[in-house]
Image: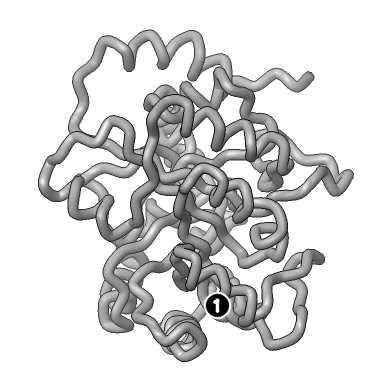
């Protein structure tokens, strides 16, 4: 078993402290990607983006057993801005539009009466099956079926590029076209956006440009890969999330929900700042991508 400093720090240092602290309202947003059995590729537990159907079922059973209810990102924002405590509220999100959500995740969510938001890279969603990163994605007919059943959808750009490396005009196209494509296929307004790859939070100029571009494109809320629970201090377009995968047993999962994993966002930020300062990175490194 790999030594995990993030796990040790969360369970034995942060968890006891968080139980004693009174913090402003914060709501967990879980970040999943693929729900499938292991594909055999070696990956650090920190960077793992696959969750087995069995482990996902265990996570959802834990939430249900402990009285959690799922809310959408719009309601989550309203609660945070109003300073409303919501101890047992949680948002569940998925990135990339993989078909395993339709096959494995949705039936489990449905069993517990939970809702979720799936973010789609629209170039890989078609009338026939397409693939992204070697995995099959959902078709538009499957997306429409899920949407009718209560699953929300948002944009994950068109081609899932590293936005920070693109000129502004191409960024505008990625944000606008992906939103329009989803709206055309679902016949409903799309408000949410998920930033692809690691979010460059240390680049204030890029963040300001992206905020303006998202607002112009009509987005009301969004999430990124910065680690932590969502709070009112963070931009509504770049809310923090908690990455979850098959390596999260019940104890670690519980610690993440309670805030004991939030501290990881600080060294994550330091690492990004260090990468930005390295001459070899050219100031454009994106570390810790999910």
Question: Is 20 placed above or below 273 here?
Answer: above
Helix, strand or loop at label 1? It is helix
> Relative to residue 78, is residue 150 drawn left or right?
right
Q: Residue furthest right?
A: 40
The quadrant holding residue 16 is top left
Question: Is 179 placed above or below 132 here?
Answer: below
Question: Is 159 placed above or below 60 here?
Answer: below
Q: Measuring 49% from the left and 53% from the top, which residue is drawn there?
A: 93
Residue 257: x %, y % from top left: 43, 30
Residue 238: x %, y % from top left: 35, 57
Nearer-the-camera pick, 130 or 237: 130
The quadrant holding residue 145 is bottom right
> Relative to residue 236, is residue 6 drawn left or right?
right
Nearer-the-camera pick, 194 or 86: 86
Quadrant holding the N terminus: top right
> From where the camera sits, is residue 172 visible?
no
Q: Measuring 71% from the left and 59% from the top, which residue is drawn there?
A: 103
Q: Residue furthest left?
A: 82
Q: Measuring 55% from the left and 68% from the top, which residue is drawn there?
A: 146
Question: Is 81 placed above or below 97 here?
Answer: above
Residue 109: x %, y % from top left: 55, 48
Check disc 1 and report the residue beneath it.
Answer: 144
């Amino acid at each position: 078993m790999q030594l995990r400093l993030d796990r040790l720090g969360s369970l034995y240092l942060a968890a006891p402290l968080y139980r004693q602290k009174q913090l402003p309202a914060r709501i967990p947003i879980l970040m999943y990607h693929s729900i499938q059995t292991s594909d055999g590729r070696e990956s650090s537990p920190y960077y793992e983006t696959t969750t087995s159907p069995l482990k996902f079922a265990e996570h959802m059973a834990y939430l249900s057993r402990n009285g959690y209810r799922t809310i959408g990102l719009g309601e989550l924002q309203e609660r945070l801005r109003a300073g409303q405590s919501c101890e047992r509220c949680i948002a569940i999100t998925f990135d990339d539009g993989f078909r395993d959500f339709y096959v494995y995740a949705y039936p489990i969510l449905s069993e517990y009466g939970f809702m979720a938001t799936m973010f789609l890279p629209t170039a890989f969603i078609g009338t026939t099956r397409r693939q992204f990163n070697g995995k099959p994605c959902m078709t538009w007919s499957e997306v429409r079926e899920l949407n009718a059943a209560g699953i929300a959808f948002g944009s994950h750009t068109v081609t899932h590029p590293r936005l920070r490396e693109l000129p502004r005009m191409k960024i505008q196209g990625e944000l606008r076209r992906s939103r329009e494509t989803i709206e055309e296929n679902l016949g409903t307004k799309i408000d949410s956006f998920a930033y692809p790859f690691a979010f460059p939070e240390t680049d204030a100029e890029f963040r300001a440009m992206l905020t303006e571009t998202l607002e112009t494109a009509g987005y009301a809320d969004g999430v990124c890969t910065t680690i932590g629970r969502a709070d009112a201090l963070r931009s509504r377009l770049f809310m923090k999330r908690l990455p979850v995968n098959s390596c999260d047993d019940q104890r670690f999962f519980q610690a993440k929900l309670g805030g004991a994993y939030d501290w990881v966002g600080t060294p994550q930020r330091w690492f990004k700042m260090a990468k930005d300062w390295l001459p070899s990175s050219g100031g454009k490194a994106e570390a810790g991508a999910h």
